[in-house]
């Protein structure tokens, strides 16, 4: 049990951050909700209440449909790609090969780079020009006589978003690798040996022993990558600028608020983004806290 | 134990202090001001009155812009020199904010206006971008008296004035003029294919068919805003000046057959463009023409400055003409300066605006920036070959405003058009595009 003094102390210590969080997070969420229910358009604040009008018009807004489609494509490709690639890299590094530390750092380094830098580099790599102006990866493919691989990258209609996800996978698969590697190292060696004695082959060991034991890691990776992809913004702007075929809710929010001065609509998009991330994160937090208490 | 407690308390205090200073960035001046007299009373007492007296002894003017680099900053410096020579008693405060075509500056300006601390005069694109934002917010003064006093109505094109006014009030002083409806072409490619510079839409289509057959990319295009720039010039070229102006005051029907025909033209023109448009900046696209990779490009006349930077020669490496269908029409955009409501130094601001609209001021600014004067009486010998031809057109043509660059539509309307255009580029459906444009005019423009 705490002594009284310790309790005072902990309250004193924690008060500044609680105040800061209350003001800068929750108060502003409340203010955004208020704006999202108002008809504010233009530089002068106008809090006239219009109910859910901003939200309803978003759901019939063709641009918002494009945003949802793009977010789904990006999330699907990015999360799946990072998890599969990260898992494979972790399994390879776990075989105890020489120079493991070197490769581990090599795979992890992209994560240390900002999305803007990644975006600028991949903008050049994924140059969609053809013919005499061909460059980047397309030029490489043409040197290697792999002409069937030459493509329009992020300017591909509908699926262009998947090309952006490639850059994100490059950046974040090292991170999932680190998560999985830690998970693999935590699996007691006795379990594998026991399985081997029972006559299980390598594939069976992974299928029935390793993968189930790694399920919590996969869940963490899913949540972390998933909420990142819902908020993706800087990477897209760095690769392609503000262009509608690669629009996502965050870009729409920015453009409609600060270029178009539709503050009510912008706030509504912000709140929808918050809700979608919360739907993903809150059950996860509740779940992890429960398991921690149990432990 | 108590020592530990003391350390922890100190840590908590330090943390609180950090948080508080982070919150109170604008307020940091206040504590400094109250501390100063306590520490050293005598100097504080003498300093304070000096600070308040200064403006009385020497008039000031604070001018806000995003001219911080290249020819723009050099041009502003040149104009400040003219100002200092004319008004040696007024101190010029250059409050320029750097960054991305004014996006940062506009955010800073919005904050200052909301706090009730406007600069005396600020830069803005002449026309609805200024009017829709700052006149609607009651933040800028009409300048009709100044225009009459300085005789600007006689030296600026008659058709310009309505475009920078709202209900008969003129709200800003244009310093420079750029032209949006310029068709840049590669003279060698046109010669090789026996093509005359097109002056009508039909001739343009015929020329581009010929070029396609010859295996040349007919029209270079870049990212989305350059596509909007192309759209506004094609609307102008297809509708003509009068109907084009009508789009913006509500007299031309956005759902009508004329607009439909213009949008069909636009859809057709997109078929002649390079396939990688979305990944090119305006410079990349313009460069295709001078490098011989494409025959035509539609871009504002700042492209000419870029061609010169590349070391290209006018009429040899690149030629220019009005966009087909818009011969005799000058589609303009302009940087202009305003007078703030409740300006701290109204006299200084008026002095600045007089310089900004004067012959000497504009002749100092424009040759350096690579644009032409808003006045029609500037000395032509100061300018290069292209700009001289633009000056002739500016003085004689019908003047209409640009959409992409803020003259004809307010920010909200423009952003709705931008969304409709982006969706159209993806699905190429002219009917939904036209319906979306009509809806945009109804929601954010003058259409009812």
Image: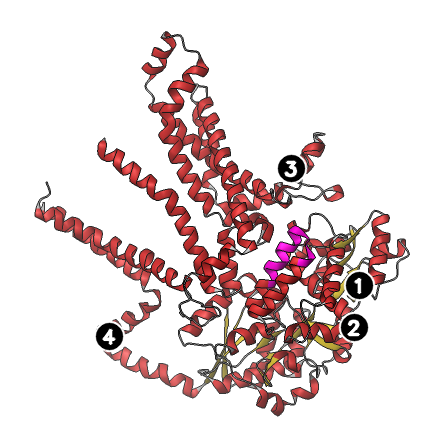
Q: Secondary structure at mark 3?
A: helix
Marks 1, 2 in one chain: yes
Q: CA distance from mark 1 to mark 3?
A: 36 Å
Q: Earlier in the sequence, mark 1 or mark 2?
A: 1
Quadrant holding the C terminus of chain A: top left
The label number, if any, that marks residue B314 in the structure image: 1
**Quadrant in the rendering for residue B283:** bottom right
Specify the subunit that label 4 lies on. B
Q: Nearer the viewer, mark 3 or mark 4?
A: 3
The residue wearing badge 4 is B40
Q: Residues within 10 Å of mark 4 (few under 14, many from 20)?
A: few
Q: Nearer the viewer, mark 2 or mark 3?
A: 3
Q: CA distance from mark 2 to mark 4?
A: 65 Å
Q: Secondary structure at mark 1?
A: loop
Q: Residues within 10 Å of mark 2 (few under 14, many from 20)?
A: few
Q: Position of residue B94 (x, y in %)?
A: 51, 73
Q: Secondary structure at mark 4?
A: loop
The label number, if any, that marks residue B389 in the structure image: 2
Q: Secondary structure at mark 2?
A: helix
Q: Nearer the viewer, mark 2 or mark 4?
A: 2
Marks 3, 4 in one chain: no
Q: CA distance from mark 1 to mark 4?
A: 66 Å
Q: Nearer the viewer, residue B276 or B46?
A: B276
Marks 2, 3 in one chain: no
Residue A99 is inside the magenta segment: no
Q: Magenta segment range? A: B417-431
Q: Position of residue A167 (x, y in %)?
A: 54, 40
Q: CA distance from mark 2 to mark 3?
A: 44 Å
The residue wearing badge 3 is A137
Q: Nearer the viewer, mark 1 or mark 2?
A: 2
Specify the subunit that label 3 lies on. A
**Which residue corresponds to the image point at 64% horizontal and 49% vertical from the top-left?**
B279
């Amino acid at each position: 049990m705490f002594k009284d003094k310790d309790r005072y102390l902990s309250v004193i210590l924690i008060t500044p951050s609680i105040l800061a969080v209350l003001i800068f997070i929750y108060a502003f969420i409340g203010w955004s909700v208020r704006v999202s229910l108002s008809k504010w358009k233009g530089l002068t604040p106008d809090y006239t209440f219009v109910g859910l009008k901003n939200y309803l018009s978003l759901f019939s807004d063709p641009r918002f449909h494009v945003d949802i489609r793009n977010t789904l494509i990006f999330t699907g490709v990015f999360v799946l790609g990072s998890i599969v690639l990260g898992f494979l890299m972790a399994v390879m590094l776990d075989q105890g090969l020489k120079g493991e530390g070197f490769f581990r750092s090599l795979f992890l380094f992209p994560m240390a780079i900002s999305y803007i830098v990644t975006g600028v580099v991949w903008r050049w790599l994924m140059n969609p020009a053809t013919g005499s102006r061909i460059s980047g990866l397309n030029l490489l493919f043409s040197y290697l006589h792999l002409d069937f691989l030459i493509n329009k990258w992020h300017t591909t209609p509908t699926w262009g978003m998947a090309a952006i996800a490639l850059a994100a996978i490059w950046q974040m698969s090292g991170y999932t690798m680190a998560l999985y590697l830690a998970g693999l190292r935590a699996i007691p060696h006795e379990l594998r040996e026991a399985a081997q004695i029972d006559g299980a082959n390598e594939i069976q060991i992974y299928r029935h022993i390793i993968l189930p034991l790694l399920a919590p890691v996969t869940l963490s990776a899913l949540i972390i990558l998933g909420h990142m992809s819902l908020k993706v913004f800087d990477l897209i702007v760095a690769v392609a600028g503000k262009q509608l075929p690669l629009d996502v809710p965050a870009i729409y929010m920015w453009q409609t608020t600060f270029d178009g001065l539709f503050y009510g609509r912008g706030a509504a998009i912000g709140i929808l983004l918050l809700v979608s991330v919360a739907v993903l994160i809150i059950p996860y937090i509740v779940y992890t806290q429960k398991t921690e208490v149990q432990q | 134990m108590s020592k530990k407690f003391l350390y922890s308390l100190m840590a908590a205090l330090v943390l609180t202090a950090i948080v508080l200073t982070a919150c109170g960035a604008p307020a940091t001046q206040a504590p400094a001001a109250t501390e100063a007299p306590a520490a050293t009373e005598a100097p504080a007492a003498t300093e304070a009155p000096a600070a308040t007296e200064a403006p009385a002894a020497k008039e000031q003017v604070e001018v806000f812009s995003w001219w911080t680099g290249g020819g723009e900053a050099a041009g502003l410096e040149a104009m400040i020199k003219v100002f200092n020579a004319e008004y040696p008693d007024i101190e010029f405060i250059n409050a320029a904010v750097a960054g991305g075509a004014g996006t940062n500056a506009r955010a800073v300006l919005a904050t200052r206006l909301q706090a009730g601390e406007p600069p005396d005069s600020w830069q803005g694109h002449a026309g609805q971008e200024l009017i829709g934002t700052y006149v609607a917010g009651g933040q800028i003064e009409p300048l009709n008296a100044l225009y009459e006093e300085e005789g600007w109505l006689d030296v600026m094109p008659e058709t310009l004035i309505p475009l920078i006014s709202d209900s008969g009030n003129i709200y800003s002083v244009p310093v420079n003029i750029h032209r949006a409806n310029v068709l840049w072409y590669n003279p060698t490619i046109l010669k090789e294919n026996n093509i005359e510079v097109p002056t009508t839409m039909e001739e343009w289509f015929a020329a581009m068919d010929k070029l396609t057959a010859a295996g040349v990319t007919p029209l270079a295009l870049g990212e989305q805003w350059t596509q909007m720039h192309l759209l506004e010039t094609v609307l102008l070229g297809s509708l003509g000046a009068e109907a084009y102006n009508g789009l913006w005051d509500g007299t031309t029907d956005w759902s009508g057959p004329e607009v439909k025909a213009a949008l069909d033209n636009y859809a057709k023109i997109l078929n002649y463009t390079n396939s990688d448009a979305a990944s090119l900046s305006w410079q990349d696209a313009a460069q295709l023409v001078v490098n011989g990779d494409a025959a035509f490009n539609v871009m504002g006349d700042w492209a000419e400055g870029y061609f010169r930077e590349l070391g290209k020669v006018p009429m040899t490496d690149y030629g220019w003409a009005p966009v087909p269908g818009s011969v005799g029409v000058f589609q303009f955009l302009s940087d202009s300066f305003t007078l703030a409501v409740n300006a701290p130094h109204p006299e200084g601001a008026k002095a600045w605006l007089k310089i900004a609209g004067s012959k000497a001021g504009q002749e100092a600014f424009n040759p350096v920036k690579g644009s032409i004067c808003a006045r029609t009486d500037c000395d032509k010998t100061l300018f290069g070959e292209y700009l001289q031809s633009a000056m002739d057109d500016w003085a004689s043509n019908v003047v209409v405003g640009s959409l992409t660059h803020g003259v004809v539509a307010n920010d909200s309307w423009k952003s709705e058009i931008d969304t409709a255009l982006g969706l159209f580029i993806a699905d190429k459906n002219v009917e939904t595009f036209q319906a979306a444009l009509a809806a945009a005019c109804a929601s954010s423009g003058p259409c009812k």
